[in-house]
Image (cartoon, rainbow, N blue to C red):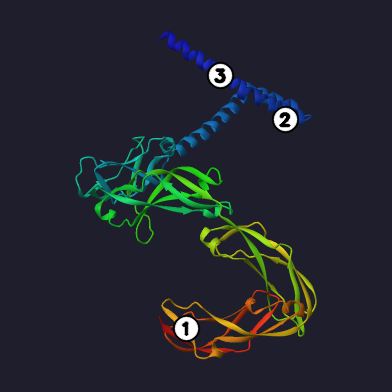
Amino acid sequence: MKKKNSKLCIFFRNLGRLFDRKVIMPVTKFVVGITKIFDKSSKKIEVWFSSSNTLLFVSLFLAIVVFIMIDQKILILSESSAEVLKSQPVHVTYNEESYVIEGLPNTVDVTLIGSKADLYFAKQSPAHDIMVDLTGLKPGTHKVNIKYNQVLPSVEYKINPSVATVIIYPKVSETRSLTVDIFNEDSLDPRYVIKKVNIDDDKVVIKGAEHTLKTVATVKALVDVKNLVKQEVGNITLKDIPLKAYDTDGNPVDVEIVPLKIDAKVEIASPSKELPIKVIPTGDLAFGMAIASIDSSETKITVYGDEEKLANLKYIPVKVNIADLKENKTYKMEIKKPVGIKSMNINNITVSVVLGPVSNKEINNVNIEYRNLGEGFTVQGMSLDDIKVAVSLKGVKAVIDQIESDDISAYLDLDGYTEGEYEVPVKVDGSDVKVEYTSKTKKVKIKIIKK
C-alpha cells in the first residue's frame, strides 16, 4: 500500500513540475513582458501579478479552459452517428464444383451506426466482409440472409439489401469449338499483317447452368495485338490469351471456361508488291491544247497490305485535274492508298504536264470486245458495222502518230445482260493517257444467246 502511495506521490510531483514548467513559467514571462510596456503603473501591476494567489487563479482559469476543450472533444467523439459504406462486395460460400448460383447481388450498401470514435475504428479495420453461406443448400430457390462480419460489438449495422432470393442450379458442362478474334490490329506496324494465329487445341469446356449454356453461340480467344512484346516477321508466342463466351447478339455470357486462358503462336508476315505509278489526267484542257508529255518524279511504288488485295492490283493510280489548263504546270500530288493497302514506301510525287497544239487522227476497223458477260452466254453482232468501229484520236501529233489499232480497246460492258437483243453503248480506252479516244459509232446492236 505504501509503495502505491509512494508512486502516486511521485506521479503528482512530476505532474506539478510539468505544470509549473509549461503553464506557470510562460504566464510569468508574459506578465513581465506586459509590465515593461507600462511605465509608472508597472510596479503595481508587477506586485499584483507577482502574488502567488494571482498566479494560482490564472493557472486555475487556464486549466479549466483546457479541461472544457478536451471535454467537448470527448463529447463530439462520443456522439452517435451513421456512416454508409457503398458497394461492398458480397462473398459467398458454396460448392462451386457442383452448383451455379443466380440472384445474389454482387455488392450491397452497409450503414454503420455508433459513436464517431467506434465508426472510425470500424472503417479502419480490414475485416468487414459481407458473407452469405449457402453450404448444405440443394438445387432450388432459397431466401438467404446477407450478414456483415462486424468488428466492434458497439457498432450497429444495416445491410441493403439484407435478404436475397437465390436460385441454385446443378452445374453442367459442354465441349465447344474455339475461334480466334483479333483486335487492336491498327496498333500493328502498317507494313505487317497477322497471317495466322495457331492454337494448340481448338476445343474448350464451358460450365454453368443448362439454360445459360444454351445461349452460348461462340467461344473466342481474344488476341490483343497490343500485347505483342515485339513486332517482326515470323512466329511470336503470345501467352495467357483470355477466353470469352458470347451469345448470338455478341453479348458476353457469364460461364466458366476451361481452360480460362491459352497460349498461341501469332504468325506475322509482310506481304508487299512493287507496282507502277499510273498518272491519270482528269477534266478537259483548254480549247486547242493537248498533252505532249506527262512525267512523275517516281514511276514505281512498293505497297504493303492484304495478299488478296495485292494480287488484284496492277498499278497505283494518281489522278491529276487538268481542267481548263492552257500552259505547262507542275503538280505536287498525294498518293491515296487503295482499299486493303496499309502502307506505301512513297506517299507524295511531283507530276509535270507539258502541253502542245491538238491534232486529230482516225483509226478504222477496231474490233469490239465484250466484257463482264455472264457465264453460259455468247454474243453475236447483228451486222458487220456492229462488230467493228472507227475510233477518233485527239492529242499532240507526235503522240497520236505512234498509236496503232492494237493500242486501242473498243468494248461493250455487258454486266447484267441476259439472253436477248440489245443496243449497247460503245466504250473506248487506250494505253496512252495523253490521248483522248472517242468511238465514231455510239451504239451497236447485238444478240446474246445461250451456249
Disc with the residue nearer the chain's start (2 vs 3)? 3
Mark 1, secondary structure of its residue: strand
Residue position for label 3: 16
- Mark seen at residue 134: none
Q: Quadrant of the N terminus?
A: top left
Q: Nearer the viewer, residue 430 or 291?
A: 430
Q: Nearer the viewer, residue 425 or 245?
A: 425
Three-letter amino acid code of the residue under disc 1: Val
Disc with the residue nearer the chain's start (2 vs 1)? 2
Three-letter amino acid code of the residue under disc 2: Ile
For the residue carrying disc 3, how many other residues have a C-alpha within 10 Å: few (<14), some (14-19), or many (20+)? few
Q: Find residue 240 and report its horizontal and vertical position in percent.
A: 43, 42
Three-letter amino acid code of the residue under disc 3: Gly
Q: Quadrant of the C terminus?
A: bottom left
Mark 3, secondary structure of its residue: helix
Of circles 1 and 3, the one toward us is 1
Residue position for label 1: 379
Q: Find residue 151 and report its horizontal and vertical position in percent.
A: 36, 35
